[in-house]
Image (tube, rainbow, N blue to C red):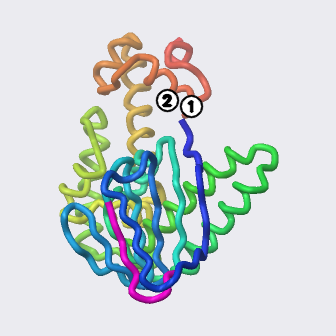
Amino acid sequence: MRMKLERIRHNWHENAGMTLNRPEGSGDYVLLHFLSPVILWYDGQKREAPSGSLIVFSPRKGHEFYSEGPLLHDWMHMTGNVEEALEEVGLKTNTLYHMAQSLQITERIARLEAEFFARNDHWECCIDTLLTELWIIVARQAAGSASQPVLQATADHLRELRAVMIQHPEWPWTNEMMAKRVNISVSRLYPLYRRLFSISPGRDLILMRVEKAKNLLAQGLSVAQVTDLLGYGSTFHFIRQFRQETGITPGKWAK
């Protein structure tokens, strides 16, 4: 299920003293990108959110914010597989991030807003793609400059991690599991891994599983056996992923 926009505005103005209180949250995902400072409450805690702060609240997550001065912010409501898309780039819902280059974020949200209201051919597919691009930019900014060199010690740990993943692609790898093994945050895992290996950790894992599947099929194992050995939840999922990467089904490849 692709991501879908329900409502959106960029550079939205509110008067000084504006308060928004959603004790029960919203029925969808809510992105807030503050271009002026606010006081933010969620999880029973008060937080100062300076200019450039960004957060995506999950459905029904209670939150409140207050702006002492005039408020300028970007916001949008979304449904679909938003949380999965965030996790793919190492981001989390209900987590406050600081954007060093807020203009980049606002520009992307403005493009999304234009596409949302124009509704030209294939607009929903275009929005899904633009949202994916937005999450990547947010992840890069949250982790610091994407061009920042990877420290040697961290690079060594990432290489060790990748070696273990190649040996055991069947393990139930998650971003949290990978980040813990190299002692870095989930938000830093994606940009550092991609910079070092020119591929995302999730995509790399898929290719590792497909390569191991080829070896197992070449040894005469059945598709069902390979499915189990590689830790796939279902044969259908394995066949679909294998075909996406090779162009043919595992059964045809084995023949």
The residue that mark 2 highlights is 241
- Where residue 167 appears, as percent x and y from the top left, is 26, 39
- Where residue 113 appears, as percent x and y from the top left, is 67, 62
Say whether marks 2 and 1 touch (CB < 8 Å): yes
The residue that mark 1 highlights is 244
- Where residue 220 appears, as percent x and y from the top left, is 38, 11
- Badge 1: how crowded within 10 Å, few (<14), some, or many (20+)? few
Amino acid type at image mark 2:
Gln
Amino acid type at image mark 1:
Gln
Q: How many marks?
A: 2
Could you say which is closer to the camera, residue 58 or residue 245? 58
Q: Can you see residue 188? A: no
x 30%, y 51%: residue: 175
Start-end of magenta stretch: 63-71
Whether residue 87 appears in magenta in the rendering, the answer is no
* Vertical position of residue 210 compared to residue 174: above or below: above
x 37%, y 31%: residue: 212
* Vertical position of residue 147 compared to residue 89: above or below: below
